Image (cartoon, rainbow, N blue to C red):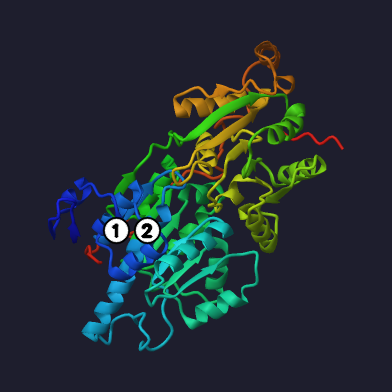
Amino acid sequence: MWIASEAGYTGPFTLGQIERIVLNNFEGLGLIQPLMRALTAANYEVATPIQLQAIPLLLSGYDLMGCAQTGTGKTAAFALPTLQRLASMATQCQEAGKEDARPSAGPDRRGPRPIRCLVLAPTRELAAQIEKSFTTYGKYLNLRVAVVHGGVSQMPQTRALQRGVDILVATPGRLLDLMNQRIADISNVEVLVIDEADQMFDMGFLRDLKRIVSKVPLDRQTLMFSATMPDEIRQLAKQWLFEPKYVEVAKVSSAATAVEQSVFHVSAQSKPKLLVSYLKSSAVTRSLVFTRTKHGADQLVKILLSSGIDAVAIHGNKSQNARTRNLDAFKSERPPILVATDIAARGIDVHGVSHVINYQMPEVPEIYVHRIGRTARAGATGTAVSFCAPDERGSLQDIERLLNSTIEVNESLSELTLSASQQSQIGSNSGGRSQSSGRSGNSRGTSRPRSTSRAGQSGGRGPRQRKSSSGNMVLN
């Protein structure tokens, strides 16, 4: 692959040289002119670390497993090289005039366009966000992008697929439904992207993913991107990726340094009053509040509305229209407080979030890192506040162990919080750590996949040639 270094030398670089080169903008990544033009139009100037490391590897044709904190540009890291690959292959086919080549994306091709890139995402919001990014970056390329997900009528999605698309972004459930109806054909996929792989696992999509992966060609480029990379996901990567390169630009245990973190120790009964008081007394401009359950999110919205605070909820039980409407309101100039569950919040990419509030502590500590990554995006600063009830102390300890640091205790609003002596008394009366906190049991909701030989496995990767390509509601 030919790329440009900061010293001005251009030439054929080996993989080792590519990995050592320090680049600070998109000019040196070897992207084609239509992509550079689109990036300029979108005001992209400086590439992020995940983009700097991943794009050269992906342009060279390698499978890749990427781990980076949320908000670090993972979508562009896989979308840009994928767009370049598809555009380059189409051009090569047109120039060669091969009758047996796959139909190109050009206007003279015969028959419907096959799906050449498949991107899988866990939530509707994230799928829509990825589709928008592909459309933005591919603005000057003759490639069609479509998105399919549940919660809406499938008819517009069916029509788009029948017209033919080059890049399909999908949630697993709707895609399988369309495949069973023989509407979606993924037998020509050249690039498979699995985004937010850890959340896919947490949401119980493993069986669906296996069915989908078994239907795409073995000769493909496979990419897995995620905010966290637990061992379960690494095991899947061994099965589905072919000699992958690993890119990790931030440790899973690290939280964004620009986020000011603190914790309130509070009784479960006082959490609603504390939240209302905190929102009214703090310089909150755009705030995201996390709860564990859908019912809890709805109840919390009622509490905030009754206290004169504009709030909306977003979770899996909301219709797609309601989710879109509430998310649009959150992006507006007068945003309501957005109360969300972790699953629904995966697709929220909103700049200007000043505060993230953990109304309930996450049971899996890595989720804490993902939650607070919703603020302090794109170089901004932010605030993350957690409400920790006595039975959540174990979860807090797990988070601090993961971060290898102690989260500062917030001593404001002391009339609503527990003093150190009260915490000690409650702790001694409770007999220690709550069994419901931390990672006891099967916290990820599914069994760990077996590590099996890849040869001959359905959905695995056999040997192949590597091709280079350019009332009094208490919530706790």
Of 399 and 383, nearer the camera is 383
Q: CA distance from mark 1 to mark 2?
A: 8 Å
* Amino acid type, mark 2: Phe
Q: Is label 2 in a helix, a strand or a loop?
A: helix
Q: Residue at x 81, y 36 (%)?
A: 473
Q: Is label 1 in a helix, a strand or a loop?
A: helix
CB under 8 Å between callouts 1 and 2? yes
Q: Which quarter of the rendering shows the C terminus?
A: top right
Of 382 and 13, nearer the camera is 382
Which residue corresponds to mark 2? 78
Judge whether 138 appears above or below 446 on screen. below
Q: Residue at x 52, y 48 (%)?
A: 199
Q: Residue at x 35, y 89 (%)?
A: 108
Judge whether 413 appears above or below 363 on screen. above
In the visual, does 285 lie left or right of 66? right
Judge whether 43 appears above or below 352 on screen. below
Q: Which quarter of the rendering shows the N terminus?
A: bottom left
Residue 114: where, in percent of width, then height? Answer: 41, 78
Of 52 and 148, nearer the camera is 52
Q: Callout 1 environment at 10 Å: few (<14), some (14 to 19), or many (20+)?
A: many
Residue 238 visible in the shown view = no
Which residue corresponds to mark 1? 58
Q: Earlier in the sequence, mark 1 or mark 2?
A: 1
Q: Residue at x 79, y 42 (%)?
A: 308
* Amino acid type, mark 1: Leu
